Image (tube, grey):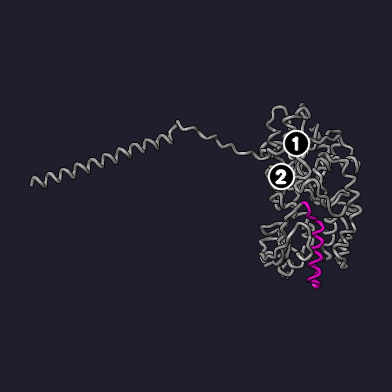
C-alpha cells in the first residue's frame, strides 16, 4: 500500500512539476508577445490618403489660393452645376459662399440645374437655392441668356462647369450667351478653367456650317475641338465678336497631352449619361448616331454611348465588319443586351461594344461615320435615316452633307476626307488661343 502511495506521489510530483514548467514557459511567452505589441514598440507612420487633384490645380483653386483680389469687393454671380468643384470635390458654390472675402450674390443654372436635379432636356424656371438661399436664374428655360434684370446685382460673372470636349454639348454655349450678356451689361466675365477630358491635342471631325447654328453648335468649330473652356472663351470672344471684358483663371500643372485620368482629379458626372470621364470619348463617337432614333447607343442601358445596336442587327456580323476596317485605337466586341428604357425598351438588341484602347490615335467622329456606313452596308433594307429625325442628325453633326452622302452610299473614307481642309484651317486658328 505504501509502495503504491509512493508511486502515486512521485507521479503527482512530476505531473505538477511539468504543469508548473509549462505555465512558466507560457507566461514568459505571453510576456514576450506583450512586449511585441506594447506601446514601447516603434509606431508605423500614420496612413495619409492622397487627396484627389494633387496633380493639378483647377481654376477655382487658383482663384481662391492666389488670385482672390480679382473678386474682392465685387458682387459675384456664378454659372455652375454639380461638376463645378475644387480639387477636393467641394462645390464651387459652397467654396465661394462661405469665403469671408467673397460676396456671392446670384447663381445661374445651365441644363440639369444648379445642383443637377433636373432631367436631361427639361426646361426649368428660376428658383431659390435651398443651401445658400441665393436666387438661381435658369439659363435653360424661357431664356438661355442672362437678362439685365438677372445681372442687376452682379459686378463680375464667373463660369465654372466641366465640359466634355465635344461640340454638341450645351455648356459652352451657355458660356457664350452669358459672355454676350456680360458685355451688354458692362460687367467682367471670368472663366475658372478645367481640363478637356479627351486631352487638349485631339482635334477631329467636321467644322460646323453656319446654316446649322443652334444651341448644340453656335460657332464653326470641329466636332472634337481639343480646347478647354477658358481657351474656347477667348476664341469665341475675339473670332465671333463678343468683345466682353474677359479673363481666364488658368489651371496649374495641366498639359495638353493629359486625359482626365492623368489629372489625379475625381470625375463628377457632367450629365446623367456621362457617368465617367471615359464616356466623353464614346459620346464623341456615338452621340450624333443616337439622334437618328433608329439605333441604340446604350442610353437606356448600363453603357451609355459605348454600345451601338438594334434588334435586327447580328452582333457577330457587325463586329466582324467593323474590326475588318482596322480603325485606329478601337476594337469592337459583339454584344447583346436588353434595353431598360428609351429606344427599343424591353427589347433584345444586338450590336457591338466599343473598346477604345489608344486615345492618342483614336478618331471618334470618323469612327462614328464608319459605324453608320457599316450598318447601312450590312442592312440595306433597314431605314436608319428616317425623314422625321433627319434635322436632329444634321444639327448634331453641324451639316447636311454627311447625312446626304451616307444615304447616297458614299464610302466613309471619302466623307471623312471631304472635311479635312476646314479642319486643318481650324487647327491653325486655334493655336492663337491655346493657354497651355
In the rendered structure, find residue 262 and report the number of the disc placed on it: 2
Q: Which residues are magenta?
A: 360-384
Report x, y in % for residue 411.
86, 65
Mark 2 neighbour class, 10 Å CA radius: few under 14, some 14 to 19, many 20 or more: some
What's the residue at 72%, 47% (across, down)?
270
In magenta stretch: residue 196:
no
Asked whether 156 or 404 is in front, the reply is 404
Report x, y in % for residue 59.
75, 36
Q: Is residue 291 left or right of residue 47?
A: right
Report x, y in % for residue 81.
72, 43
Counting residues from the start of the chain, the first of labels 2 and 1 encountered is: 1
Q: CA distance from mark 2 to mark 1?
A: 14 Å
The reply to whether residue 220 is visible in this rendering is yes
What residue is pinned by disc 1?
A: 252
Q: Secondary structure at mark 1?
A: loop
Answer above or below: position of 114 versus 385.
above
What's the residue at 85%, 58% (across, down)?
394
| Magenta stretch: helix, strand or loop mostly | helix
What's the residue at 66%, 38% (across, down)?
88
Q: Report if the CB atoms under discs 2 and 1 are less than 8 Å apart.
A: no
Amino acid at each position: 500500500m505504501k509502495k503504491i502511495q509512493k508511486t502515486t506521489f512521485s507521479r503527482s510530483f512530476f505531473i505538477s512539476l511539468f504543469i508548473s514548467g509549462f505555465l512558466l514557459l507560457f507566461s514568459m511567452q505571453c510576456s514576450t508577445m506583450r512586449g511585441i505589441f506594447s506601446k514601447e514598440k516603434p509606431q508605423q507612420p500614420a496612413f495619409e490618403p492622397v487627396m484627389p487633384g494633387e496633380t493639378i490645380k483647377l481654376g477655382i483653386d487658383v482663384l481662391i489660393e492666389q488670385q482672390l483680389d480679382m473678386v474682392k469687393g465685387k458682387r459675384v454671380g456664378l454659372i455652375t452645376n454639380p461638376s463645378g468643384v475644387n480639387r477636393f470635390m467641394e462645390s464651387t458654390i459652397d467654396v465661394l459662399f462661405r469665403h469671408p472675402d467673397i460676396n456671392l450674390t446670384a447663381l445661374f443654372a445651365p441644363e440639369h440645374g444648379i445642383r443637377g436635379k433636373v432631367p436631361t432636356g427639361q426646361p426649368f424656371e428660376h428658383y431659390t437655392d435651398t443651401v445658400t438661399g441665393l436666387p438661381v436664374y435658369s439659363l435653360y428655360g424661357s431664356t438661355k441668356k442672362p437678362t439685365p434684370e438677372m445681372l442687376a446685382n452682379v459686378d463680375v460673372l464667373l463660369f465654372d462647369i466641366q465640359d466634355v470636349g465635344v461640340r454638341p454639348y450645351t455648356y459652352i454655349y451657355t458660356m457664350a450667351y452669358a459672355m454676350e450678356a456680360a458685355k451688354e451689361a458692362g460687367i467682367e466675365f471670368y472663366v475658372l478653367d478645367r481640363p478637356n477630358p479627351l486631352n487638349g491635342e485631339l482635334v477631329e471631325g467636321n467644322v460646323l456650317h453656319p446654316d446649322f447654328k443652334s444651341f448644340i453648335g453656335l460657332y464653326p468649330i470641329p466636332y472634337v475641338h481639343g480646347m478647354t473652356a477658358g481657351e474656347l472663351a477667348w476664341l469665341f470672344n475675339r473670332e465671333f465678336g463678343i468683345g466682353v471684358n474677359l479673363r481666364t483663371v488658368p489651371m496649374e500643372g495641366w498639359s495638353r497631352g493629359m486625359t482626365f485620368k492623368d489629372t489625379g482629379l475625381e470625375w463628377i458626372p457632367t450629365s446623367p449619361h456621362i457617368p465617367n470621364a471615359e464616356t466623353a470619348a464614346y459620346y464623341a463617337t456615338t452621340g450624333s448616331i443616337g439622334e437618328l432614333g433608329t439605333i441604340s447607343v446604350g442610353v437606356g442601358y448600363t453603357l451609355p454611348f459605348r454600345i451601338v445596336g438594334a434588334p435586327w442587327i447580328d452582333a457577330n456580323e457587325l463586329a466582324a465588319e467593323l474590326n475588318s476596317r482596322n480603325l485606329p485605337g478601337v476594337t469592337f466586341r459583339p454584344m447583346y443586351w436588353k434595353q431598360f428604357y428609351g429606344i427599343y425598351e424591353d427589347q433584345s438588341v444586338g450590336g457591338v461594344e466599343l473598346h477604345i484602347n489608344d486615345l492618342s490615335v483614336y478618331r471618334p467622329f470618323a469612327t462614328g461615320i464608319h459605324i453608320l456606313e457599316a450598318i447601312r452596308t450590312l442592312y440595306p433594307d433597314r431605314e436608319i435615316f428616317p425623314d422625321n429625325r433627319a434635322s436632329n442628325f444634321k444639327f448634331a453633326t453641324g451639316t447636311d452633307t454627311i447625312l446626304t452622302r451616307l444615304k447616297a452610299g458614299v464610302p466613309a473614307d471619302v466623307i471623312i476626307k471631304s472635311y479635312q481642309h476646314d479642319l486643318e484651317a481650324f487647327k491653325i486658328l486655334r493655336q492663337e488661343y491655346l493657354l497651355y
